[in-house]
Amino acid sequence: MAILVTGGAGYIGGHMVLALLDAGEEVVVLDDLSTGFAWAVPKAAHLVVGDVADSAQWKEILAKHRIEAIAHFAAKIVVPDSVADPLGYYFSNTVKARALAEFAVRNGIKNFIFSSTAAVYGEPAVNPIFETAQPAPINPYGRSKLMVEWMLEDTAKVHSLSYVALRYFNVAGADPKGRLGQSTPNATHLIKVAVQAALGMRAGMDVFGTDYPTPDGTCVRDYIQVSDLIAAHLLALGHLRRGGESLVLNCGYGHGNSVREVIDVVKEISGNDFEVRLTGRRAGDPAALVAGAQAVRERLGWKPSYNDLAEIVRQAYRWERKLRDGTFARAR
Ligand code: UFG
C-alpha cells in the first residue's frame, strides 16, 4: 500500500517524502513542479508530474498503486499573492482540494492528512492560540485553507474518510542530514532571507515594523523545524491507520522569537554582519503568532527534536550555502 504525497517535490512535502522513505513506506508523489523540483524527489519514490485535480492522472496512479492515504501538501502559500489573486488561490487551494477529497471518497481511500496553517487564526487577540479559538482568517490564503478544513469535517461525517488537519506555524530549517531544504527562488520567509543576507546573496535585509506591541517592537513567530513538523505527520498517519478520529491540531513549539532575535542568531551562527534596514510594517502581519502546542503532544504523542532556534538557523544556513554553491545532491 502506498502513500500519495501531493506537493512532494516542494519544501515541506519533500521532507515528508524523505521521512516516509526512511520509514520504509511506498511513496507516490504527485506534483506539477510549478514550485517544486524533480531533483528533490528520491528515485525510491514514484514521481508523477501533473495536477492534483486531474482525474486522468488519478486513474494512472490507481492502475499502478494501491493508495492507502493521501498527504496533501500541494498549494499556493504566499499571503500577499493571495490578496492580489484570490480566485487563483481559491482555485488551487480550495477547489483542487475538493477534487482530491472526492477522489479519496470515490476510491475508498480512508486516510487524509491536510496541510493547514496558522493563518486560519488571523490576528489572534491572545497568544498562545489554541485549536478551540474561533478561526478568523484575514486573507484569501487563510480562508482558502480553512474552507478545506470545513470540507473535510463535513465529508468525514458522511463518508468513511478520516483526516488530520495540521495548522503549521512558521516552518523553517532543513533536513538534519543535509538532503533537502527551502529551495524556492525569491522566497520571502524571514530565516531564508536572513541567511541569504549573511551569505552575501542579497544586500542586507529589511525588518518590517518595529512598533508592534511586543517586547522589542518586532513581530513574534513560533518557528518550527521542518523535520519536527513532518514527525507530526507520520504520527498522524499512524493515528489514522489505527482508526483514530479526525483531528485538527496546531504545529508549533509553543514559544516565539522576534524578528530581531532571529536576525541576531543568524549573524551569530554565520559569523557575518549584514545591513539591517528598519522599515515600516508589512500589510497583514499579526504582531504575534504562537501555537498552543499541547494538543499535538497529547493526541499524537509528538515530541520535538529540534526545538532550538540556533539549530534551525544552522540547518537553513548550511542548506542555503549548498544551494548557492550547487553542492547539494540531486536525488534524480
Ligand atoms: N520579516 C521581515 N523581513 C523579511 C521577511 C520577514 O521583517 O525580509 C518579518 C515579517 O514581517 C514577519 C516575520 O518576519 O513579522 C515572519 O515573516 P515570514 O514571511 O517568514 O512568515 P509569516 O509569519 O508572514 O508567514 C507564515 C507562513 C505563511 C502563513 C503565516 C501564518 O509563511 O504561509 O505564517 O500567519 F500563512
Image (cartoon, rainbow, N blue to C red):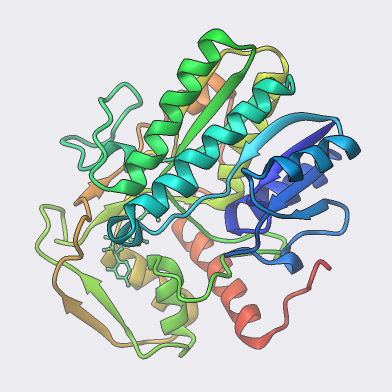
Q: Is residue 268 left or right of residue 97?
A: left
x 50%, y 24%: residue? 152
x 79%, y 45%: residue? 28
Q: Which quadrant: the C terminus?
A: bottom right
x 75%, y 45%: residue? 57
- Please say whether residue 255 is visible from this viewpoint: no
Tell me how many marks there are: 0
Give percent across and percent down for residue 184: 54, 70
Q: Is residue 275 left or right of residue 34?
A: left
The foreground one among 4 and 55 is: 55
Looking at the rendering, the quadrant in which ligand 1 lies is: bottom left
Q: Which quarter of the picture shows residue 26?
A: top right
Q: Which quarter of the picture shows residue 328?
A: bottom right
x 68%, y 34%: residue? 70
Q: Which quadrant: the N terminus?
A: top right
Which residue reaches farthest front?
56
Above or below, 94 against 312 in this view is above
The foreground one among 312 and 139 is: 139
Give percent across and percent down for residue 295: 45, 24
Which residue reaches farthest top?
158
Q: Is residue 120 left or right of residue 170?
A: left
Give percent across and percent down for residue 11: 59, 58
- Please say whether residue 213 is visible from this viewpoint: yes
Give percent across and percent down for residue 23: 81, 40
Above or below, 313 against 86 in this view is below
